[in-house]
Amino acid sequence: MPVQHKTAVIIVNEKCGGHSRTRIAHFAQCLRGAGFVVDIVPTAFRGHATALARKAVHDQKYTHIVAAGGDGTIAEIAEGMAGSDCILGILPLGTANVLAHELGIPSDDAASAGVMARGNSRVIWPGHLQSDGWNGLFIQMAGIGFDAHVVHAVSTRLKSALGQFAYVLNTVRSLWRYRFEPLHVLLDGVEYDAVSVIVSKGSLYAGKYVLTRDSMLAEKRFSVVLFRAPGILATLRASLSLLRGNLARQRDVEIHTARCIEIRTPPGIPVQSDGDARQFTPVRIDIAERPIRIVSV
């Protein structure tokens, strides 16, 4: 990369409201105070962040590409910069901001800018997800089954109005509506049965809740959580265990590691990744071909 001084482009999710835009301006000011030359570029449509990140890499003007948005925005930007020397920075403006919690990114803008200014980074390996109707990367986690059904049911308008409570509300609704169909899951070719599956690169879920003991962000593999028991009571037990941080102790929950996950049958089961709907099964999940360099605290 020819550029030697610190330069950053902040790619802004087009759905950010007035409060978020004020924060973006303040964060840019903090970066400039830390010695960065800063550009701010808003997206115009879903998927635009990928094109903007790809252009930023091609132009060779920036040391850092900052994702201003939620985990879905981060995943879009990762798609466009994977394999490059640019460092991915995060300004968490989403609903759950799981990756920011995972990495310990400070919530204070000046402190976060200071982290970027120090120039420390680490390499992480995203996941690659191909479902019936979608193909792309994810950074933190993917879900097939109940949690994906909840994500599919949450409208952008409701999420903007209620934040994380939109997911709580739709979780309660979905308990009575979702049909827990048995899934035939292949983990590195070995078959398992489950009614819902979470494939995770990190250790956290839905914010700060501990899903698995170990983070796989730097590994070329996933943690795979299999929920074996169907129904309302089993789902409530698992949800409470997640909130308490002891999900792994549940007798009807299994946690494995794998490099390749396939769910071919049944078709039509909802899929999500990083909190965004990703169509339906069949689905295949592998490690991405190229890594991401991301800011390190």
Image (cartoon, rainbow, N blue to C red):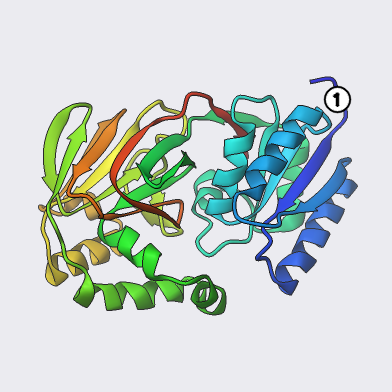
Residue drawn at point x = 81 percent, y = 30 percent: 59
Closest to the observer, 96 or 175: 175
In the image, what residue occupies the spot 53% across and 52% down?
72
In the depicted structure, whether residue 141 falls above or below residue 2: below
For the N terminus, the image quarter is top right
The furthest residue to the front: 133
Q: Residue lying at the far top in this picture: please name it.
A: 2
Residue 179 visible? The answer is yes
Question: In front here: 101 or 80?
Answer: 80
Lateral position of residue 275 relative to residue 119, left or right: left
Residue 296 visible, this orientation? no
Viewport quadrant of the C terminus: top right
Pinpoint residue 177: horizontal percent, then vertical percent. 22, 74
- Relative placement, left or right, of 264 versus 166 is left
Give residue 245's position: percent from left, percent from top.
30, 56
Q: In the rendered view, tell whether residue 247 sits above or below residue 215.
A: below
Q: Residue at x 48, y 30 (%)?
A: 125
- Choose between 187 and 209: the one closer to the eye: 187
| Rendering coords of residue 75 (x, y %) | 54, 45
195 relative to 63, above or below: below
Q: Residues within 10 Å of mark 1 (few under 14, many from 20)?
A: few
Q: Amino acid at mark 1?
A: Val
Instruction: Give residue 115's quadrant in the image.
Output: top right
From the viewer's perspective, is 11 left or right of 158?
A: right
Residue at 40%, 39% (x, y): give it. 129
Q: Residue under circle 1?
A: 3
Picture coordinates of residue 49, whole percent (x, y): 66, 47
Question: In which quarter of the view is residue 34 placed?
Answer: top right
Identify the secondary structure beneath mark 1.
Answer: loop
